[in-house]
């Protein structure tokens, strides 16, 4: 088996992995929206909710958690910019719906990043020439999406939750540094790869 065939096979494996991750992530988001819609319908009946908190090792409250008998996963209300609270602007039922929809909408950029990554490996698994300007642009785009999400994702979540859930906004580390770092690394890697590709083209043209 040639090196190109090995590379293509590995790209196919990664393509399939990211395809499954993309489908799984999309299904979770659809399921989440479906639960919110069901909660608003008259068919859902009366739900029972329990408000609790996550705490650190000293017992300080970190976030508010609402557990519902109709929702299998717990719903975390506060995140970075918001202080833990059990005082809500609406009924707990409406709060559950609002926070579910907010959490789903805020994660749409991550779904887009997964889709771009899947497209990258799909192209690598079928292209005879894996290094193309389109590939570099796609990697760079993923990096930009992650950087922007890391910068504004938590802030957007907290502002929307403060408006639609608690009315409380508290500044405390709103930036996701890990997401920004990952996006920045991808962006730099795409620039390095494109620069190396252009140098190789120039060398080939001179020979």
Image (cartoon, grey):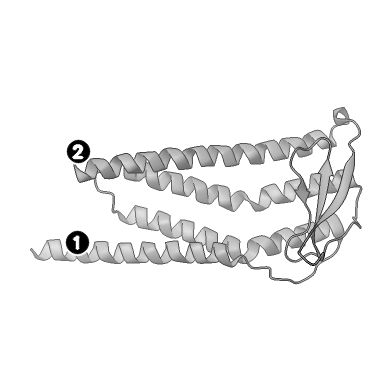
Assess whether mark 2 and mark 1 are in contact (beta carbons under 8 angstroms): no
**Local secondary structure at mark 2:** loop
Residue for point 13% across, 62% down: 205
Q: Quadrant of residue 123?
A: top left
Residue 75 vs residue 26: left or right?
right
Q: Is residue 127 visible?
A: no
Q: Percent from the top left, x then y, of residue 82?
A: 79, 64
**67 w.r.t. 171: above or below:** above
**46 w.r.t. 63: above or below:** above
Q: Nearer the viewer, mark 1 or mark 2?
A: 2
For label 1, count other residues whose C-alpha is less than 10 Å away and answer few (under 14), some (14-19) or many (20+). Answer: few
Q: Percent from the top left, x then y, of residue 89?
A: 90, 55
**Dot 1 corresponds to which residue?**
201
Q: Percent from the top left, x then y, of residue 144?
A: 50, 62
**30 w.r.t. 3: above or below:** above
Residue for point 35% across, 53% down: 134
**Local secondary structure at mark 1:** helix
* Figure quadrant of the N terminus: top left
Residue 184 vs residue 73: left or right?
left
Q: CA distance from mark 1 to mark 2?
A: 27 Å
Furthest-top residue in this view: 43
Q: Is residue 66 visible?
A: yes
Q: Quadrant of residue 45?
A: top right
Q: Which label number is shown at residue 1?
A: 2
């Amino acid at each position: 088996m040639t090196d190109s065939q090995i590379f293509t096979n590995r790209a196919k494996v990664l393509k399939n992995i990211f395809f499954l991750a993309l489908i799984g992530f999309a299904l979770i988001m659809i399921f989440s929206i479906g639960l919110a819609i069901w909660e608003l319908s008259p068919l859902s009946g009366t739900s029972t909710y329990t408000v609790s908190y996550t705490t650190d090792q000293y017992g300080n409250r970190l976030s508010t958690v609402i557990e519902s008998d109709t929702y299998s996963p717990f719903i975390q209300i506060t995140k970075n910019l918001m202080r833990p609270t059990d005082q809500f602007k609406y009924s707990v039922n409406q709060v559950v719906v609002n926070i579910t929809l907010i959490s789903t909408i805020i994660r749409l950029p991550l779904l887009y990043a997964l889709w771009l990554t899947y497209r990258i490996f799909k192209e690598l698994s079928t292209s005879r020439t894996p290094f193309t300007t389109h590939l570099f642009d796609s990697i760079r785009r993923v990096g930009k999406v992650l950087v922007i999400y890391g910068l504004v994702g938590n802030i957007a979540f907290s502002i929307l939750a403060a408006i639609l859930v608690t009315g409380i906004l508290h500044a405390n580390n709103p930036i996701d540094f890990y997401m920004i770092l990952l996006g920045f690394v991808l962006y730099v890697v795409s620039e390095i790869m494109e620069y190396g590709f252009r140098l190789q083209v120039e060398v080939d043209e001179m020979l």
